[in-house]
Each structure stands twice: as C-alpha cells, then as structure tokens.
Image (cartoon, coloured by chain):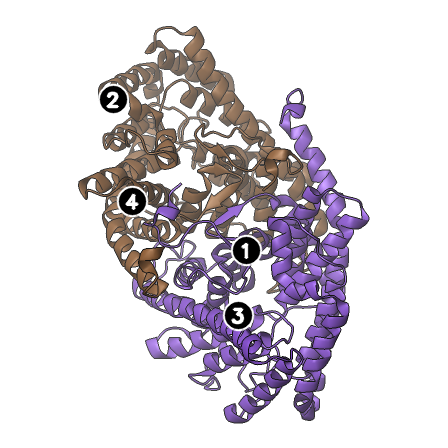
Chain colours: A purple, B brown
Amino acid sequence: MKQHSNKPEQVTVAYQLLRWTVLVLPVALIVGSLVALFLWLLDKATKIRFEHGWLLYLLPVAGVLIYWLYRLGGRNAEKGNNLIMDEIHQPGGGVPARMAPLVLLTTVITHLFGGSAGREGTAVQIGGSMAAWTGKTLGLTQRDIRILLMTGIAAGFGAVFGTPIAGTVFALEVLAIGAMRYDALVPCLIAAVLADVVCSAWGISHTHYQILYTSTHLTPYVPFVKADLLLLLKVIVVGVAFGLTSFLFSWLIHAIKHNANTYIKIPWLIPVVGGVMIITMTFIAGTRDYLGLGVYSQSPDGISIVNAFRNTGTISDWSWLWKLVFTAVTLGMGFKGGEVTPLFFMGATLGHTLALLLGAPVDLFAGLGFIAVFAGATNTPLACTLMGVELFGADHVLYFAVACFTAYYFSGHSGIYASQKLVVSKFYSNPESGR
Amino acid sequence: MKQHSNKPEQVTVAYQLLRWTVLVLPVALIVGSLVALFLWLLDKATKIRFEHGWLLYLLPVAGVLIYWLYRLGGRNAEKGNNLIMDEIHQPGGGVPARMAPLVLLTTVITHLFGGSAGREGTAVQIGGSMAAWTGKTLGLTQRDIRILLMTGIAAGFGAVFGTPIAGTVFALEVLAIGAMRYDALVPCLIAAVLADVVCSAWGISHTHYQILYTSTHLTPYVPFVKADLLLLLKVIVVGVAFGLTSFLFSWLIHAIKHNANTYIKIPWLIPVVGGVMIITMTFIAGTRDYLGLGVYSQSPDGISIVNAFRNTGTISDWSWLWKLVFTAVTLGMGFKGGEVTPLFFMGATLGHTLALLLGAPVDLFAGLGFIAVFAGATNTPLACTLMGVELFGADHVLYFAVACFTAYYFSGHSGIYASQKLVVSKFYSNPESGR
C-alpha cells in the first residue's frame, strides 16, 4: 500500500468505487438483459411443453443435439460453473464468451423437451462468460478480470432470482467451503443490484412466495426474543433432513455422471440413455410434474414449488425424492441447466411433508426447505439466509438461519460444485480447522 | 480427516453438534444471565443519573475508582475486546474470569456518573471471559477454548441487543478485515440464540425502533425489483458519510488514547482529566443528552437514538459530532463501556440530519446510520446488514446492505479494534488483495 501512503485511504477507495461502477456497468447491462431473455424463453419453452406433451419423447434426440452443440462450441465451455470458479481461484485459459449463448440455448432445449433442471447455473454461466468477455474487450489485467468474474456470478444470480443481496453474498461464499473473502464485496453488490434492475426493466417479474404463518408465541416487533422453542427444535430436525437431502443429491449426481462415463463408451449415447430414463420414470411416477423447472405445474393443483407452500394435499410424501432423482438423471446424463430451482423444489416439498408429519406450519417449513437444501448443496448458508429474507421477509429470519446453518453443517464436504475449495472443515475439532 | 474415513461424515457432524450444544449451554446460561443483570443495572444507573444531576461532577472521581479497580483486578483484563480477539487468533495467557465482573462494574460506574459509552464491548467481554472460564473449568483443549471464546462473543452480542443472528455473524466477521471463516458457525448460533432466550427470560426487553417509510416506487411483495434509483443514490451518498464518520471516530479515539498516555505521566490523572473534559463539554454543548447510553433522553423530546427516528426537530445538525467527541473522550481517557451504542447514536443522528438535507425519509436514514456507522467502525458489514433485518424488518434490506457495505468500504483499514487482522485490503487492485 506504499503508493497510497501520502494520500488518505478514502481517496483510493472513492477512485476504486467509481472505477468499478464504470467497469461493472456493461456487465450488469449485458447480464441483466441476457437473463431477462433467458427467463422469457424459459417461460415460453415451459408453456409450449405443457401444450405439446409429445415433445417429451424427443428428449433423447434433444440430448444428442445438446451434445453436438457443445462438441461444436468448444469443450471447455462444458465445465460450466466449475470453470468460472477455477478461473477465479487460479486464472488459466479464461472463460470463453461462447459459454453464454451455448448454455442459454441448451438449457432452453433441456426445458422444452422436459428435462428436470434449473436456472441458476445457466444465469451464473451467462454472468461469468459475459464478465470475462467484457474484461477482455476492455483490456483489463488478470486480477481485474478475476474480480469481474465474481461480479458476473453476482449479477447472474441476483437477476435470475430477483435477490441481489443473496447474489452478492453467494458470489463470495460459493468459492470456498467454510470461509468467505470480501475481495469484491462492493463491485458484486453494484453488479447484482444493477443486473436485477435491468432484468426487471425488461418486464420480467419473479414468482413470489408467501409465508403467512406468524407464531402466537412471539412478542410483537421483537419476535425473536421470545422464541417458540418447540418450533425451533422442529426447525433443527428438518434442518438435518434438508442437509442430508443436499448430501444425497450431490452424491447421486456425481455417481450418475461417473457411472455414465464409465459404462457408456459412446459419449452421445449418454444423453440418449438419460432421455429414455426420464421418459420411463415419468411413466412410473405417473405424473409430468417432475419435469422442467417445477415452479408451477401444468394443472393448478399439481405438484410444484408454489403448491408446496399450500396445504391442499397435492404434494406426495416422496415428491422430494422423485424430483431429486429426475434432476440427478437430467443433469448427470448431460442435459443443461441449473441445480438450484430443483433444489428449491426438493426442499419445499420435503419441508411440506415434514411439516405435516411434525405438526408444524406448512408454508414456513416449505420456505425453510426452499432455502436450506440449496444452502447445503452449495455450502452457502449466509447467502441462503439472506435469500430467505429477500423472498419471504424478516419475520422468520431466525428460523431461516437455523435451518440453513444446520443443513450446511449436515451436507458433508462435497456439494454440487467440484471446484469449491475446502478452507475450514465442518468438524470443528480437527487439526485442519485450527489456524 | 483420516480418523473419520470409515464412517459417514454426518455421524461426526451429529456428534459435534451434540457436543457443542452441551458445551455451549453453560456459556449461554451464564452470559445471558449476566447480560440481563448488566442491562438491568445500566437502566437503574441511567435513571439514578437522571434524578441526581450532581453525579456528573463526581465523574473524575469515578475515573480514579475505575483506574484503581483495574489496577487491583489485573492489568491484562484492561485489554478488553482486543485480548479476546488476540486469544482467538493466537492462544496465549487466556482470558481472565475477573474480566467479566470488572467490566460490568466499571461500565455501570461510567454510566452512573455520566460517561458517554455503550454496552456491546462490555457484553462481549462478559461473554468472552465467561466462555474462557467455562472452557478452563471443563478442562477443554486450547482449540476448543478458542471456539468457545467465539461463542462467548456471539452470546454476549446476541443477548445485549436481542439480535442473535447478527451476534453469530459478528463473532466470525469481527476477527479479520475482508474475510470470514466459518470455524464456529453453528456453535456461535446456538450460543447466541440461547443467550438471547435466557436474557429475555429474565424479563429484559430491548428498545424497538420502527421504520414506517415505504416507497411508493416499489412493487408489493418484491419491493427490491423496482428499486427507487434516486433513493438508492442517496443511500450511497450517506453510506460514504457514515463510513467517514466511522473513520473519524476510530482515528479520534486512538489519537486521544495516544496523546493522553504521552502527555499525562501519572496514569490515574488520565480519567480525572477525561472527567473534567466531559463536564466542560457538557456546559459548552448546553445539554446532558450526550452523556450515557443515549438510547432515550431525560426529557421525552431530548436528543436520543429513539428521537432520531422521528422528525420532530429535536436533533441538531451537529448532534452526531458531539456524541462522537463525548464518546471518544470517555473511552479514550480510561472509562469503560462499549462503543456500539454511541455508534448507533452518531449514525442515527447523522442519518436524521442528512435525510432532512437530501429530502429523504428520516426514519429510514436514521436506521441506515444506526447500522452503517457501526459496520464501518467494526468492519462487519454482513453482521450489520443482518442486524438491520433483525431490528427493522426486511422491507429495506437492499438499502441496509448498500449503506453498510459502502460505509465499510470508506471507513479505512483501522477500525476500533486494534486486534483485527487485515486479510483482504479494501483496495481491490492492490497486490495484497490478490487471492
């Protein structure tokens, strides 16, 4: 810091703030707009699939198409989120710009033909690749591109879910297990807020979920002081279940990928087999509600995230497991899309089921599952607590934190992102956790 | 992790969870109860001071008493919060148990005779020293005591303000600038929640503040999507001002300490001079509203934190600066207590003044200042954002984050805790900020 020693730190900080606001502006504009386009296309694809049920039978063909597109578009783009995280940890070959159109297109194809997948991975890859492209175009140094990559993650995440603060914290928290560095705190926040504003300026709105439950045990205004201890205990119990679900999902998706690559020697056959499996499973499950995004279902009383917040008897006891298997097969066998919306689905339906089992409020526990299974699978408990606040309000922030932290604690050290670094072990007493 | 390789990680995690719940229980019980006692005594002391104005003139004598108590009680307890942080960074001689009664007693004395100070430092020291005592009594290893010290901070902070989640994140975030390690995430949360429950079970209630402002520019339910961009800009501007205020306070308190030790050769004379300064300044300011805690004032329409949230014309333009100087003198010259409630005061009154200047909602900006000056002075932007949510609700969480992150960014690298480590520089482009 010697070069700053003869002027106040604040001058440098002000300069950096202005500089990063300017640098982040194109990232936010491009990412916000592309995410808006993506969400619009996704909505169209889902509606077309609802209208034309036969599209599902073309899923194996769609798989070949996706394989072929990635083969054509360049192999390293296939590493997706992990490539972006690797480039932040240790700059290498860079994140290719073609990752954005590739992942956008193939995710929409996956959803059009009934694959079970999400949005966040796609949005983050759009964010990362467009940030890298902006950085390269502006001739920035590797160090600046690294920060810009983080702002890309924040922008993509913030825009796709309409939760800029969760997006900001996610971008910093996701890189490592057990630690967070504030390298790019303010640039990430600027990017996430602006990308969200841009995305909604395009007319995109986000589904809103409501938790109407308010405990009578709570005092007004300071509801957390007189906590409902029995409810708190139930929240810990479901938090453990959410963490184990995250663990199961991470394990299954890795196992499917590994076995597919081991036993299916012809690469393009992998998504074909995957597509056939999805079709078969749809017949066994007897419903199409586990296909696609799952935020809402074809019939208003189907199994969906929205309906998991309502106690209308539509969610079955094993809905969470069905969605888990559908998604692990879809993403493990080479289809594209994020993991997060399916994680919301698993969490919300499992929370719903456990609430009925434990005699707890269904909407609250669906909301807890929504954020906590995600927290466990991505090892981002703080981002998910903040997401709970952004989506559901502050009334239950204590339960959000308890559920997310517990799920994080019980989800193991693997998670869905292979490129996450392990900085602090979750076993506090181990030598690794010392300083 | 070899010793765990033949059983699932979750078994170890479950064992650790149970183990830490048991270990943390006595810490939470003792700290929650002592903080309740402390808050009760503080309230009594404040009321007695209101009734007996002449007590202020004994402040210099009280200073000698405090000096003498610490002299008697052992010098290293005087290092306070910094000693606890040092012991977490690098275990040394341990945190003495006598720190708790010493700091409790001397803080109450400071408040009884009109020193301008807070509560959090005291609560954190009660938490840290009682955690260390528990660890020693139970014969724990240094590594476990280190984690227990963090839970003590979380418990003290969570109980004293009634904000367990902010307390949890504060305990992890305060140790270093620019980074957070999840060493003790779950034990800290358990400790903070339980200590808060214990404290309120003793009948202690916390002041509540209300931000009634809701922007008409916002869409219902998802208020942050259509953000009010002009208001956002104003929030950034006041965020910078809050950060500079944090910086000024940290600088002034260090400067006063340094100069007092340099120029006043007889140690017990330092608090005497400090007391005389406070009395003189009270006459110059023409009000006693800058003495003590400042949450509420002697007359209902005085200058106080509560009144900063109301637009009734009681807050003067320089109230924030008066409180800043009063507190820097009180704490810099050897009186005891925390810095945080005075930081709330400076922030809320500065926010109030700037809101009137910029044509912004007074209650919102008072709330932003409340959390953001604190965020800047302690370098804990995430804990303070969560504190905003816990105290004021989720409606304005975006503004909370923007104000706290901006203030953090502009407060420099010093802060009020000398034992904070600098891990990631706030200048993103510097070599130090590389991974």
Q: How many marks?
A: 4
Is disc 2 surrounded by few (<14), some (14 to 19) or many (20+) residues within 10 Å? few
For image coordinates 45% across by 30% down, the residue present is B417
Is disc 4 surrounded by few (<14), some (14 to 19) or many (20+) residues within 10 Å? some
How far apart marks 1 and 3 lie (CA) works out to 27 Å
Give the mark nearer the N terminus: 1 vs 3: 1
Q: What numbered label is drawn on residue A432?
A: none
For image coordinates 64% across by 43% down, the residue present is B235
Residue bearing mark 4:
B144
Left or right position of A269 against B165 = right
Q: The disc labelled 2 sits on which kind of residue?
A: Gly
Residue bearing mark 2:
B74
Please, what secondary structure does the residue beneath circle 4 have? helix
Which is in the foreground here, disc 1 or disc 2? Answer: 1
Q: Nearer the viewer, residue A267 or B150?
A: A267
How far apart marks 3 and 2 lie (CA) works out to 55 Å
How far apart marks 1 and 2 lie (CA) works out to 44 Å
Q: Percent from the top left, x then y, of residue B99? A: 27, 30
The quarter of the picture where the N terminus of chain B appears is bottom left
Q: The disc labelled 1 sits on which kind of residue?
A: Val
Q: What numbered label is drawn on residue A174?
A: 1
Residue bearing mark 3:
A210
The quarter of the picture where the C terminus of chain B appears is top right
Please, what secondary structure does the residue beneath circle 1 have? loop
Is disc 1 surrounded by few (<14), some (14 to 19) or many (20+) residues within 10 Å? many
Which is in the foreground here, disc 3 or disc 4? Answer: 4
Left or right position of A424 against B434 = left
